[in-house]
Image (cartoon, rainbow, N blue to C red):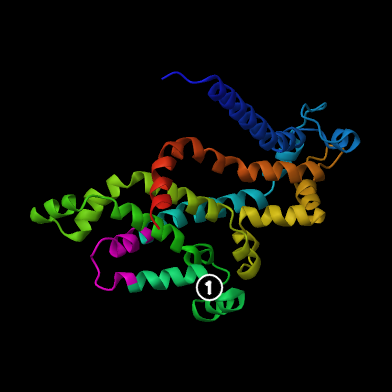
Amino acid sequence: MQNSRNDKWLAVLFYAFTIVFAALCLYPFLLVIASSFTEEATLLRNGYRLLPEAVSLNAYKAIFSTNTIPDAYLVTIFITVAGTALSLLVTSLAAYSLSGNRLRYAPQLALFFYFTMLFSGGMVSSYILTTRYLHLQDTILVYILPAVLSPWNLFLMRNFFNDIPKELFESVKLDGAGELRILRSIVLPLSLPALATIGLFYALAYWSSWAPAMLYIENPKLYSLQYIIMQIIRNIDMAQNIAVSGTPSTVQAVPAYTVRLATAMVTVGPIIFLYPFLQRYFVGGLKVGAIKG
């Protein structure tokens, strides 16, 4: 069936809208990239430009000449990798237990998880639990353990497991497989779209985590990258300290302002490269959670 003339015009309109919207989203990002490579004095004199008039790498040299950003990078990478792996393990086990008819009181147990999505204990109760009872303050585990399970991701994963044909489970059980083997050999390999999607959700949450550093961390070596950049953006003194300590004496202008921009680029860099590798799983992973509640 051939498309009508109105359909073609509608397609052109959609493409034009998408291109304009993408350009509007990319413009500030490209502006920050170009400005981070601009010489400090030129940036202050001429403002932001998409094409830098005087290219300079002094901001990036200043960042990586000190231990502040590299240490924060290692902390953030560790909590992202370890936290995502642990969260996927815990979420998969909990979702598998609540899926199907494996537990007699699964609906009642699911209600407890659902209740936490609607009502939160608040910051005070969370702070008391973390410091007085769990004693996680000033440890790297404070980034991971309080966020190890998201109820929303749990229900998303459970719905995906529920869509796997029951006949497949029954046939495997007839061969003598237990629940753990079914999960490891059947359920998880069939759930790669959901695992990839939920894994990216967890990875983004851990990568963007800064509140635990503000509330519970006193050791500067345990600061996350997001907390460092928040401090730099809100406090020009910290950017100047990094710029002064990381700038060679031969450089006349201390790149304090471009250090802010370069730090923002360094922060978002690695997580962007996850999207192309996981994009093909998104449609299948999100579609299941959108169909069933």
The residue that mark 1 highlights is 119
Vertical side of 150 occupied by 259: above or below: above
Quarter of the N terminus within the rendering: top left
Residue visible at 29% across and 51% down in the picture:
163
Marker count (numbered):
1
Let me know if residue 149 appears in the view.
no
For disc 1, the neighbor class at 10 Å (few under 14, some 14 to 19, many from 20) is: few
Quarter of the C terminus within the rendering: bottom left
Residue nearer the viewer, 10 or 146: 10
Q: In this view, does 144 lie to the left or right of 287?
A: right
Q: Where is residue 218 in the image (x, y as percent from the top left)?
A: 64, 68
Q: What stretch is highlighted in magenta?
A: 91-107
Q: Which amino acid does label 1 sit on?
A: Phe
Residue visible at 58% across and 27% down in the picture:
10
Residue nearer the viewer, 91 or 1: 1
Q: Where is residue 81 in the image (x, y as percent from the top left)?
A: 46, 51
Residue visible at 79% across and 28% down in the picture:
52
Secondary structure found at label 1? loop
Vertical side of 164 occupied by 109: above or below: below
Q: Is residue 235 magenta?
A: no
Q: Does the magenta stretch include residue 92?
A: yes
Q: Where is residue 173 in the image (x, y as percent from the top left)?
A: 12, 56
Q: Is residue 13 left or right of residue 241?
A: left
Q: Position of residue 201 (x, y in %)?
A: 49, 51
Let me know if residue 122 appears in the view.
yes
